[in-house]
Image (tube, rainbow, N blue to C red):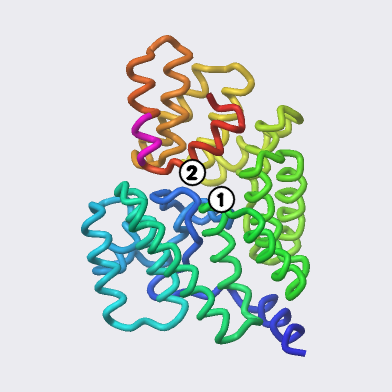
Amino acid sequence: MRAVIAALILACVPAPAFAQFTVIPPFEPGAVTPRISPRDYSFGALEAEPTGDWARCSNYARRFTHEEVLLGCEGLLSAEPDAPDRALVHYWRAIAYRQAGDEVGAASAFDVALQAYADWIAEDRYQAEPYFQRAGMLIYLQRYDAALADYTYIDGLLPRQPRTHGGLGRLAFARGDYLAAMREYDRAQTLAERRVAGDDYSIGRCESRAAAHIELELALSICNRIVRNTEGNPEALVARGFLKFIRGDLDSARADFARALERNEHLASARYGHGVVLVHLGRVEEGDADIARARTLASERVRALEAAGLR
């Protein structure tokens, strides 16, 4: 009965907002852009720009050093936040350790974050949100089977949710199963379009087709539409740049990656794509510098794109 009630509630109300803003667990930390896709690729759409320790801990727009991020997170934790905020803060704290190059600190912090999500789930195992967030973190950590278990549980609790299939699309992409990623993103889009205010999964639909090297004309149409509709969202530009690279249009691909960097200079996928194209154009030193910088920003995202053919 509680599962039925939860399904009815989720269908009728918007996604929950934690603290000052709505959060999507990060696939690529630093990609703070308008919410056009709940693919867990970014910290997500901010309903209000965070301030104080929230801004520092989330590293909003990549304005803060790792030390400042960690101080912001510690400040939030000292206020004894409730379970949703506590889990999220530990998640951000762990990412800050990893990006600072402290793998020992990161490993310990991710263990604490996982326990924080377990504590949140223990309060009410019929909530979907902690499973969604934990699954995103597990993909980030390349614990794919555990992430799949969370998505499978959510699907049993609340079937036919676009966000579940979007997450499964991201999981399949990370595993290199691009045909499965296509199917899941297409399914997510179909389900989302049946809602009054559905989310858009076009970036994943475009990227997965590019990685699979099939339906490239359809992929270009999808990418063009999302770039146009979002007035040049950086992640959409990266997806289109990746597609153009796969199609062999290097100059146009470089233009898209460069435009994405103009919008967000800290977006690792844009920096990496720009570097790869420069190498192919013979500007090896500049390209290698961009690639090295991208790996320090979000090595997991870079690794996924490299495996998908952006190399």
Question: Quarter of the image containing the N terminus?
Answer: bottom right
Q: Main SS of the magenta segment?
A: helix
Q: Residue at x 66, y 39 (%)?
A: 176
Looking at the image, residue 224 lies above or below residue 6: above
Residue occupied by mark 1: 142
Coordinates of residue 291 in the picture (x, y in percent): 40, 28
Q: Earlier in the sequence, mark 1 or mark 2?
A: 1
Q: Which residues are magenta?
A: 292-296
Residue occupied by mark 2: 300
Q: Residue at x 76, y 62 (%)?
A: 194
Spot the residue most to the bottom. 1
Is the Cβ of the residue at disc 1 closer than 8 Å to that at disc 2? yes
Q: Residue at x 55, y 39 (%)?
A: 227
Looking at the image, residue 260 lies above or below residue 245: below
Q: CA distance from mark 1 to mark 2?
A: 9 Å
Coordinates of residue 134 in the picture (x, y in percent): 55, 65
